[in-house]
Image: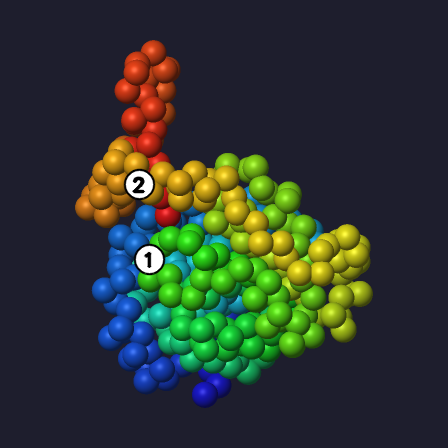
């Protein structure tokens, strides 16, 4: 079913869809994607976007952006601040509307386990750390939807053993590259290396984010065309050191305790705790318990 669109205020296009399309997501996923789930990552999403969006604006200069799996809309909000005129966010009906950081008229509630079809194209489509939450057949449909929506796609998805809530379809980047290739899209794997050591960006983005461009239109973006010449044919299956450290610490009692705390405490309290830890660093350097404390906090902050 195509979604209807109309022009809203302040340069935001308003989209609507049938409520029938959202019933399944409300029934099956509400208990997983709670208010605290989104609250936990909204700060990291915004700071990550503030680093990455300027690259994308310089390379692709989009005036319209759609985000499949937008969550609270942090990435779209940063695109809007960077000068993008039209934004559209699509995610499940379980997303709390009163937490959105984009206008509610720019949000579409939609079950992304089903192919998403719009009645227009955008300059840029993004889908970040979403595909791993969908069944394999829905992951393939997500790629098809993204290719239909825009000639330039920014995509990231969790790799095997990455961990996280409701990760049921973790794949190496090459899997997604092959699906995009079937639609005539080439991978440009240079962004990861520009942000790899930037701690302002969530390590999952630093590890997984890849740009895909319709090969027939690649010449429209000279910078991306140049990058493609030096980019590997398929994105490399890389593991970020932050994920590696989290993985090898899985059996550590201190890390395990931190993981328990992460699940029990509300996200707001966890953020306050993490901020308070920084004031202790100089003191803990002189204490033998510092290594235990570090492992505890890694468990607390693990995505």
Residue at figure coordinates x 36%, y 15% from the top left: 285
Task: Check the image and report above or below for 62 versus 181.
Answer: above
Left-right relation of 66 to 294 = right
Residue at figure coordinates x 31%, y 74% from the top left: 25
Residue at figure coordinates x 30%, y 16% from the top left: 288
Task: Give the secondary structure at mark 2.
Answer: loop
Q: Which mark is residue 165?
A: 1
Task: Give the secondary structure at mark 1.
Answer: loop
Q: Which mark is residue 251?
A: 2
Image colouring: rainbow
Estimate the x, y position of residue 103 in percent, counting from the top left: 41, 62
Task: Say which of 138 and 15 sits in front.
Answer: 138
Residue that protrudes farthest toward the top in the picture:
286
How crowded is the residue under tag 1: few (<14 C-alpha within 10 Å), some, or many (20+)?
few
Task: Say which of 155 and 217 sits in front.
Answer: 155
Q: Quadrant of residue 181?
A: bottom right
Left-right relation of 217 to 149 = right
Q: Earlier in the sequence, mark 2 or mark 1?
A: 1
Residue that protrudes farthest toward the left in the picture:
264
Task: Check the image and report above or below for 277 versus 134.
Answer: above
Estimate the x, y position of residue 239 in percent, counting from the top left: 52, 47
CB contact under 8 Å: marks 2 and 1: no
Please count the marks in the image.
2
Front disc: 2 or 1: 2
Estimate the x, y position of residue 132 in percent, counting from the top left: 43, 64
Quarter placement of the N terminus: bottom left
């Amino acid at each position: 079913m195509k979604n209807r669109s109309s022009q809203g205020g302040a340069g935001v296009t308003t989209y609507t869809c049938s409520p029938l399309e959202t019933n399944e997501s409300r029934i099956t996923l509400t208990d997983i994607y709670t208010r605290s789930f989104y609250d936990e990552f909204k700060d990291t999403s915004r700071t990550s976007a503030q680093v990455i969006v300027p690259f994308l604006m310089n390379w692709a200069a989009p005036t319209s952006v759609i985000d499949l799996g937008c969550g609270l809309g942090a990435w779209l909000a940063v695109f809007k601040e960077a000068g993008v005129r039209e934004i559209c966010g699509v995610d499940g009906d379980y997303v709390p509307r009163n937490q959105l950081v984009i206008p509610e008229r720019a949000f579409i509630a939609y079950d992304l386990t089903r192919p998403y079809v719009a009645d227009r194209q955008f300059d840029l489509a993004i889908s970040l750390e979403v595909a791993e939450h969908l069944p394999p057949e829905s992951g393939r449909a997500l790629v098809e939807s993204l290719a239909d929506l825009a000639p330039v796609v920014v995509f990231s998805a969790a790799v095997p053993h990455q961990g996280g809530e409701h990760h049921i379809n973790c794949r190496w980047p090459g899997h997604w590259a092959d699906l995009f290739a079937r639609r005539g899209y080439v991978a440009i794997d240079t962004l990861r290396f520009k942000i790899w050591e930037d701690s302002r960006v969530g390590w999952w983005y630093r590890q997984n984010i890849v740009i895909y461009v319709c090969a027939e239109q690649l010449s429209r973006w000279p910078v991306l065309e140049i990058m493609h010449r030096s980019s590997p044919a398929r994105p490399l299956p890389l593991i970020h050191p932050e994920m590696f450290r989290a993985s090898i610490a899985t059996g550590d009692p201190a890390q395990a305790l931190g993981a328990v705390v992460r699940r029990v405490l509300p996200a707001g309290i966890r953020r306050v705790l993490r901020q308070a830890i920084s004031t202790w660093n100089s003191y803990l350097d002189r204490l033998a318990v510092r290594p235990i404390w570090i492992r505890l906090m890694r468990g607390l902050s693990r995505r």
